[in-house]
Image (cartoon, grey):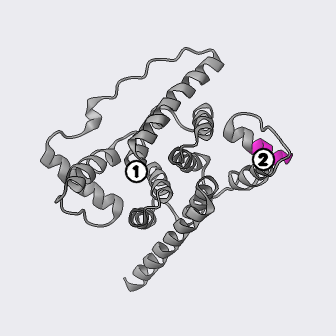
């Protein structure tokens, strides 16, 4: 086995690579870990967000177990960050899928502590202060401002329950403003989420705003697309690449016109 690929696998997955003479294992060894995870263009932490989102959205039971364990055992993500990931993931991929990941996080956190001979401390109840304003008018106003900051366009008027209660009140009035993850972290999770769901309009919006805001650079977006393609499929990756190319062309034309 390629020693560098084996080393990368062990660092990422926090266990030795089990070699086997079959095409899938060979591709995992030589391409996924030998070429993709070892690339310098994106941090391992950000590759984990893309990967966790991809395997979670695909309902891939063993990969979910493996990547949740690896993210926590490596120390790349804290337990608090992983639980915050679940909430953000739920917004873009649905509560049933998020519910499964939440259960896996509890299981793998207990496994890590058992392996290390450490007692698992009870998870602290989140502080209600994290819920933000409880005045609905103020919260909707904050949600509109957050929407504009994240999406780089004005917020839509709250004319339907989806926009009023969902988008402005909850998604941008609360979730995107929570302190548990940075906006940059949330960008990687969101871009992977809308891409894996084949959501053309949200994909155009979130890819474009991630690039326009500077939260994700052009080079990082290219690496994100490759990482995403490995875990969600190259057909979905191609759709994401086309969307990113269109966004970059639009931003380039905008820069020329200014």
Residue closest to the eye, 59 or 126: 59
Q: Residues within 10 Å of mark 2 (few under 14, many from 20)?
A: some
How many callouts does the rendering have? 2
Residue 181 image label: none
Q: Are marks 1 and 2 in contact (CB under 8 Å)?
A: no
Q: Is residue 235 above or below residue 193?
A: below
Residue on which the image places disc 2: 25
For residue 121, side relative to residue 68 (left or right): left
Q: Is residue 65 above or below residue 207?
A: above
Residue on which the image places disc 1: 92
On the rendered image, what quadrant is the N terminus found in? Answer: top right
Q: Residue at x 68, y 51 (%)?
A: 37
Label 1 element class: helix
Q: Residue at x 44, y 18 (%)?
A: 122
In the image, is residue 150 part of the stretch drawn in magenta?
no
The secondary structure making up most of the magenta span is helix
Label 2 element class: helix
In the image, is residue 2 part of the stretch drawn in magenta?
yes
Q: Earlier in the sequence, mark 1 or mark 2?
A: 2
For residue 108, side relative to residue 29 (left or right): left
Q: Residue at x 84, y 45 (%)?
A: 3
Span shown in magenta:
1-8
**Residue 245 x %, y %:** 52, 74
Q: Quadrant of residue 36?
A: bottom right
Q: Residues within 10 Å of mark 1 (few under 14, many from 20)?
A: many
On the rendered image, what quadrant is the C terminus found in? Answer: bottom left
Q: Is residue 116 above or below residue 135?
A: above
**Residue 2 x %, y %:** 85, 48
**Residue 210 x %, y %:** 44, 62
For residue 61, side relative to residue 251 (left or right): right
Farthest residue in the bottom direction?
257
């Amino acid at each position: 086995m390629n020693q560098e690929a084996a080393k990368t696998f062990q660092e990422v997955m926090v266990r030795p690579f089990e070699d086997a003479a079959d095409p899938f294992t060979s591709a995992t060894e030589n391409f996924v870990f030998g070429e993709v995870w070892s690339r310098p263009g994106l941090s391992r932490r950000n590759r984990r967000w893309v990967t966790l989102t991809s395997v979670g959205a695909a309902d891939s039971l063993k990969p979910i177990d493996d990547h949740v364990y690896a993210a926590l055992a490596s120390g790349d993500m804290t337990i608090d960050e992983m639980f915050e990931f679940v909430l953000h993931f739920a917004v873009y991929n649905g509560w049933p899928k998020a519910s499964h990941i939440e259960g896996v996080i509890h299981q793998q956190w207990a496994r890590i502590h058992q392996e290390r001979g450490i007692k698992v401390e009870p998870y602290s109840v989140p502080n209600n202060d994290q819920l933000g304003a409880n005045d609905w008018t103020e919260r909707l106003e904050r949600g509109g401002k957050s929407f504009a900051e994240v999406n780089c366009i004005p917020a839509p008027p709250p004319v339907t329950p989806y926009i009023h209660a969902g988008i402005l009140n909850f998604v941008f009035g609360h979730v995107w403003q929570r302190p548990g993850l940075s906006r940059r972290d949330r960008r990687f999770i969101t871009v992977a989420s809308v891409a894996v769901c084949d959501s053309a309009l949200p994909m155009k919006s979130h890819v474009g705003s991630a690039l326009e805001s500077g939260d994700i650079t052009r080079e990082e977006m290219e690496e994100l697309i490759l990482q995403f393609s490995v875990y969600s499929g190259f057909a979905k990756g191609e759709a994401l690449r086309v969307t990113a190319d269109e966004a970059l062309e639009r931003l380039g034309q905008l820069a020329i016109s200014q």
